[in-house]
Image: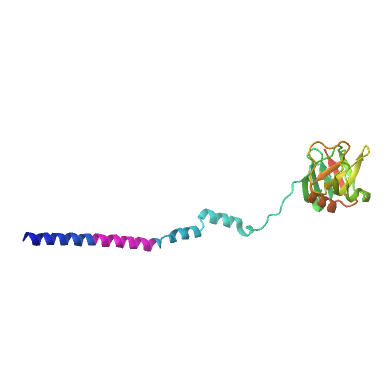
Amino acid sequence: MARSSAGTFVAGLTAAALAVVGFLAYQASAAQDRHGPPGERGAAASASPSPGAARKDAEAGGDRGKPKEREEPAPPAGSGAGERVVYSLRGDRVWLVGANERVTRTYRVVPGAVDPLPGEYTVSESGRTERVTGSDGVPVAHVVLFTQVEGVVVGFSAAVDGSLPEGPPKAGTGGIRSGAADGEAMWRFAEAGTEVVVVP
């Protein structure tokens, strides 16, 4: 009788254990069905943009990926009107101002030892030289001269090798140097008859 009771008890425990295992397996299966296979939930989350990202994309609209038009800073006040070259002595900067007061290019320059006086000048045909050796001995290109100061010619140019002067300028030089690309832009813009306005 005792042996039969013990067997019944063991069978009951086994059945209970199997029931618990079955329930846990069911829970795991249900959780997997809700969240998808391992790794799938994370992939879906990364594929869907966050609300903040979606809002930024909407605000960007159709301009996303399109290059924005570069806006050049305006030339100094009192630098004249119309198509002209503006040169700031204090700022060591040049502006190429086209039609409708639109700045087509502006850039920094390195002045020579002799500065032009503030005022308005005009580029002459003889003031343009494609290539020559500068007064400092450097081969230069795209030379646009516009005045003289005590016998020293003053104008814009760029070193053929694209370099800019370093250190104090050589005495008696009036070359206003720029990089090669800026010098080429000046050459194309400042044809004979172009006004050059020098401001303090």
Between residues 61 and 8, which one lies in front from this camera angle?
Answer: 8
Residue 84, placed above or below residue 11 = above
The residue at the point 84 percent across, 43 percent down is: 176
What's the magenta bit mostly, secondary-structure-wise?
Answer: helix
Is residue 158 among the parts visible in the rendering? yes
Tell me, what colour scheme is on the image?
rainbow
Q: Quadrant for residue 64, please give it.
A: bottom right
Between residues 173 and 82, which one lies in front from this camera angle?
Answer: 173
The residue at the point 64 percent across, 58 percent down is: 63
Q: Is residue 196 left or right of residue 62?
A: right
**Image coords of residue 92 (percent x, y):** 79, 40
Residue 62, placed above or below residue 127 = below
Q: Is residue 94 magenta?
A: no
Residue 54, placed above or below residue 118 = below
**Image coords of residue 118 (percent x, y):** 86, 39
The residue at the point 45 percent across, 58 percent down is: 42
**Image coords of residue 114 (percent x, y):** 87, 37
Is residue 81 among the parts visible in the rendering? no
Residue furthest to the left: 1
Q: Is residue 23 magenta?
A: yes
Give the residues drawn in magenta, as a range: 19-34
Which part of the image, by quadrant, shows the C terminus? top right
